[in-house]
Image (cartoon, rainbow, N blue to C red):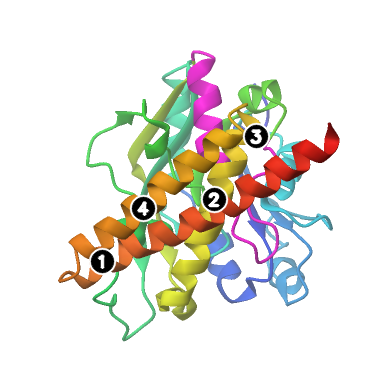
């Protein structure tokens, strides 16, 4: 058995405001066995390094610098530096519950077929700020909210996969699939995503299991910028691009994407009108429709790129 049974990893890019609380929540874990906390500084230009260095007196903490931007790149760098058989990823603007590592580790110990696990995510809004009326439950999921109930759930629908901000993975499975795909996942300020969804698809295809563990709770800070409508349009656009890329990686590229994207765009517009009297659902469906424009844009670029290569 390795000295470190589980490795907690924070990948960060210019989030010094929240980073200290995230690190402190991991160093204060009630996990009795060996664990480590790795902070991967992904090309930050703020006070990230100083925030970590001020805590390096704790022997559990390790700092590494990864200059190549990209969440998937940073996650792979953290995995390479880690000693644990289980890798637990916490976002730099999240706070883990005291039992987070213990609950996740026990889940893997009790199930040798478990490849991926994540837990409930609650939201922390800025002091004195309430969620806007136009924020639907569906769009709140874009802020990281994730709750499948009070009992453990084995995921069969990849769309219900654990959130990346509260996410763990078995090292041997990650190595078997070649790590996190750098074509997915955020890069700097762009909002590419879907890497966790792809991981769940790969796990299920290979006969592994993916689980929601309700007691593995993390709370996610919601910055004011994410309470502006413009952020959701941008997020929806990149979600559409991410879905297009994921399909292309799965061999589903081509003109069929134009049909699928067009149908979804029209469906989104129709539902926007259908919920015209409900501000939250109306905005939710409008963001969905807008995201399909991003999907179609990426699909067209993919078709053009493929034709040029022939």
Provide the residue designation for mark 1.
282
Q: Are marks 4 and 3 in contact (CB under 8 Å)?
A: no
Question: In terms of sequence position, does the residue under pointer 1 or pointer 2 come before the other?
Answer: 1
> How many residues crowd around disc 1 within 10 Å: few (fewer than 14), some, or many (20 or more)?
many
Residue at left 69%, top 41%? 303
Image quadrant where residue 102 sits? top left
Using the image as rendered, state which of residue 115 and residue 288 is in the foreground. Answer: 288
Residue of label 3: 4
Tell me if 54 is positioned left or right of 217 in this view. Answer: right
- SS at mark 1 in the image: helix
Answer above or below: position of 24 versus 62: below
Q: Are marks 1 and 4 in contact (CB under 8 Å)?
A: no
Q: Magenta segment: does it hold 9? A: no
Question: How far apart in space, not on screen, are marks 1 and 2 (Cα)?
Answer: 20 Å
Report how far apart the C-alphas of labels 1 and 4 lie in the structure.
14 Å
Separation of residues labelled 2 and 3 (CA atoms): 42 Å
Q: CA distance from mark 3 to mark 1?
A: 49 Å
Q: Secondary structure at mark 2?
A: helix
Q: Main secondary structure of the magenta part?
A: loop
Residue at the spot of label 2: 295
Q: Which residue does the image show at 51% across and 47% down from the upper left?
A: 164
Return the disc, 1 or 4, that comes first in the chain's sequence: 4
Report the residue marked by disc 4.
Answer: 266
Q: What residue sits 54% from the left and 50% below the top? A: 295
Q: Quadrant of the N terminus?
A: top right
Look at the image and give the residue range highlighted in magenta.
Answer: 180-207
- Nearest the viewer among 232 and 89 is 232
Q: Position of residue 91 (x, y in %)?
A: 55, 56
Across and down, in percent, residue 308 comes to 83, 40
């Amino acid at each position: 058995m390795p000295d470190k049974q589980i490795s907690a990893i924070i990948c960060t890019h210019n989030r010094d405001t929240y980073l200290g609380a995230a690190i402190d929540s991991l160093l204060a874990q009630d996990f009795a066995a060996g664990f480590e906390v790795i902070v991967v500084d992904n090309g930050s230009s703020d006070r990230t390094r100083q925030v970590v260095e001020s805590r390096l007196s704790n022997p559990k903490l390790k700092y590494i610098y990864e200059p190549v931007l990209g969440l998937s790149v940073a996650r792979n760098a953290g995995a390479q530096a880690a000693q644990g058989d289980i890798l637990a990823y916490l976002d730099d603007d999240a706070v883990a519950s005291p039992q987070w590592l213990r609950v996740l580790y026990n889940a893997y110990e009790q199930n040798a077929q478990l490849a991926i696990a994540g837990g409930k995510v609650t939201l922390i809004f800025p002091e004195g700020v309430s969620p806007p009326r136009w924020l639907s439950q569906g769009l709140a999921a874009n802020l990281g909210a994730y709750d499948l109930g009070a009992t453990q759930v084995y995921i069969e629908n990849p769309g219900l996969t654990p959130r990346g901000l509260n996410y763990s993975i078995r090292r041997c499975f990650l190595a078997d699939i070649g790590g996190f795909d750098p074509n997915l996942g955020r890069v700097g300020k762009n909002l590419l995503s879907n890497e966790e969804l792809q991981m769940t698809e790969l796990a299920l295809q290979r006969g592994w299991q993916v689980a929601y563990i309700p007691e593995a709770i993390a709370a996610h800070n919601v910055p004011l910028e994410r309470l502006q409508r413009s952020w959701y349009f941008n997020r929806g656009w990149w979600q559409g691009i991410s879905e297009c890329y994921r399909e292309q990686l799965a061999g589903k590229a081509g003109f069929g994407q134009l049909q699928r994207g067009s149908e979804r765009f029209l469906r989104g517009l129709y539902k926007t009108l259908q919920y015209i009297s409900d501000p939250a659902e109306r905005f939710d469906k409008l963001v969905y429709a807008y995201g399909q424009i991003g999907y179609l844009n990426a699909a067209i670029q993919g078709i053009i790129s493929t034709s040029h290569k022939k």
